[in-house]
Every structure is written in C-alpha cells, then in structure tokens.
Image (spheres, grey):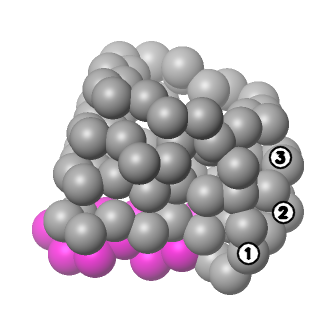
C-alpha cells in the first residue's frame, strides 16, 4: 500500500506504462481494477477518495500529485510512482 500523509509518496519498485494525461479528477473508484497504461508527463493527479489498484506494470509521473480522504494505492505488480511535488 502507498500512503501520503503530507509528505512524499512511498512506492514499491517496478515499472509502469501510462499514456499522457493532463488532469485526472477522481471522486470515487475511477480505476477500480487495472490500468494497462499509466500516466506519464501528466500535469496534475488529484485523487479525493476511492482507490487505485494496479494489476499491471505502470509508471505514474506527474508535476503535482494530491491524494486525500482515505485513498489507497495498491500495487499488485511492480510499480513506480515518481512525482516532483507530492
């Protein structure tokens, strides 16, 4: 599990592949089961509630990542989350 409590996101090792996305707003379970492509070179990722489960390898990269309100990120395979500002 990955948690953000006002600090850096802590991620497990691995790889991910995601297409370019500018803004993602998630108020529920936007990605409930699997993501076969990941967000690379995105601007902002805002997750307000729900969960993200990666069943496939993915790389999540963004300038701004905000995770709030009981959000969990589960990596079932290898995953890398890398953000400049978290």
Q: Are marks 2 and 3 in contact (CB under 8 Å)?
A: yes
Q: Mark 2 — residue? A: 77
Q: In which quarter of the image is residue 25?
A: top left
Q: Indicate which disc, 3 or 1, sits on the residue closer to the N terminus.
A: 1
> Which part of the image, by quadrant, shows the C terminus?
bottom left
- Residue 72 in view: no
Q: Residues within 10 Å of mark 1 (few under 14, many from 20)?
A: some
- Alpha carbon distance from label 2 to label 3: 6 Å
Residue name at image x 84 percent, y 49 percent: 56
Q: Is residue 59 magenta?
A: no
- Alpha carbon distance from label 1 to label 2: 8 Å
Q: Where is residue 67 in the image (x, y as percent from the top left)?
A: 29, 47
Q: Position of residue 43 (x, y in %)?
A: 27, 41
Q: Where is residue 85 in the image (x, y as percent from the top left)?
A: 19, 65
Residue name at image x 34 percent, y 52 percent: 62
**Total numbered badges shown on the rendered structure:** 3
Q: Is mark 1 on a helix, strand or loop?
A: loop
Q: Mark 1 — residue? A: 14
Is residue 68 placed above or below 11 in the rendered structure? above
Q: What stretch is highlighted in magenta?
A: 1-11
Q: Indicate which disc, 1 or 2, sits on the residue closer to the N terminus.
A: 1
Q: Do the residues labelled 1 and 2 touch (CB within 8 Å)?
A: yes
Q: Where is residue 82 in the image (x, y as percent from the top left)?
A: 43, 69
Label number found at residue 55? 3
């Amino acid at each position: 599990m990955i948690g953000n409590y006002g600090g850096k996101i802590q991620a497990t090792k691995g790889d991910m592949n995601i297409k370019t996305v500018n803004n993602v707003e998630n108020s529920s379970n936007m990605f409930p089961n699997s993501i076969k492509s990941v967000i690379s070179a995105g601007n902002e990722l805002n997750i307000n509630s729900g969960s993200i489960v990666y069943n496939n390898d993915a790389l999540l990269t963004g300038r701004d990542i905000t995770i709030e309100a009981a959000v969990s990120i589960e990596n079932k395979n290898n995953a890398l989350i890398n953000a400049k500002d978290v």
